[in-house]
Image (spheres, rainbow, N blue to C red):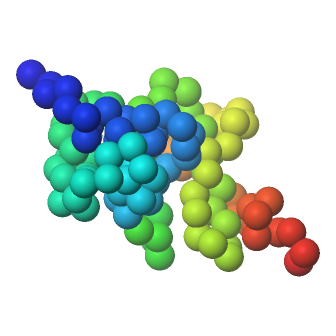
Amino acid sequence: MIRRTRQREAIEEVFQASRRPLAPGEVHEAALPAYPGLGLRTVYRQLKDMVDEGLIVGVDYPGQPLRYEWVSEKDHAHFICRRCRRVYDLEVDVPDVEITAPRGFTVMGQETVFYGLCPECGEGS
């Protein structure tokens, strides 16, 4: 049974408003105005519960902190800003890539990542 707490609602609202993968610290910072007493440990517990419930998934890229995003039925790409290191969802068609996996391997998905500067970091460059 999912407990509907004010903390949980604040965290869910952060994800719905951000529309991009977020690190636990980003979730915490963004949820504080709605729930000033929210602790970072509570954020981690809620993120774990939300993963267990299938609401969010981890987005894990080398050299980046683990981030979380809402589960999406649609395949999508990510964009990582080289300056601020934020990760953004891209609304682009991700082509299916057909590969022959090594013997005994099962392909279950793919990741498409683009790098560059986000609009904020690109200003004045």
At horizontal 37% and vertical 53% (from top left) the residue drawn is 32
Judged left or right of residue 46, residue 60 is: right
Instruction: Name the one closer to the observer, 70 or 3.
Output: 3
Question: Residue 101, position in %: x, y?
Answer: 44, 47
At horizontal 32% and vertical 46% (from top left) the residue drawn is 35
At horizontal 18% and vertical 40% (from top left) the residue drawn is 49
At horizontal 22% and vertical 59% (from top left) the residue drawn is 39
Question: Residue 63, position in %: x, y?
Answer: 47, 76
* Residue furthest right in the image: 124
Above or below for 50 versus 37: above
Judged left or right of residue 105, residue 92 is: right
Instruction: Name the one closer to the observer, 96 or 85.
Output: 85
* Residue furthest left in the image: 1
Displayed quadrant of residue 17: top right
Above or below for 107 versus 28: above
Position of the C terminus, as image quadrant, is bottom right
Position of the N terminus, as image quadrant, is top left
Question: Residue 50, position in %: x, y?
Answer: 25, 37
Instruction: Name the one closer to the observer, 115 or 96.
Output: 115
Q: How many marks?
A: 0
| Residue 102 seen in the figure | no
Above or below for 52 versus 59: above
Question: Residue 59, position in %: x, y?
Answer: 43, 53
Judged left or right of residue 62, residue 7 is: left
Instruction: Name the one closer to the observer, 66 or 74.
Output: 66
| Residue 83 seen in the figure | yes
Judged left or right of residue 51, residue 28 is: right
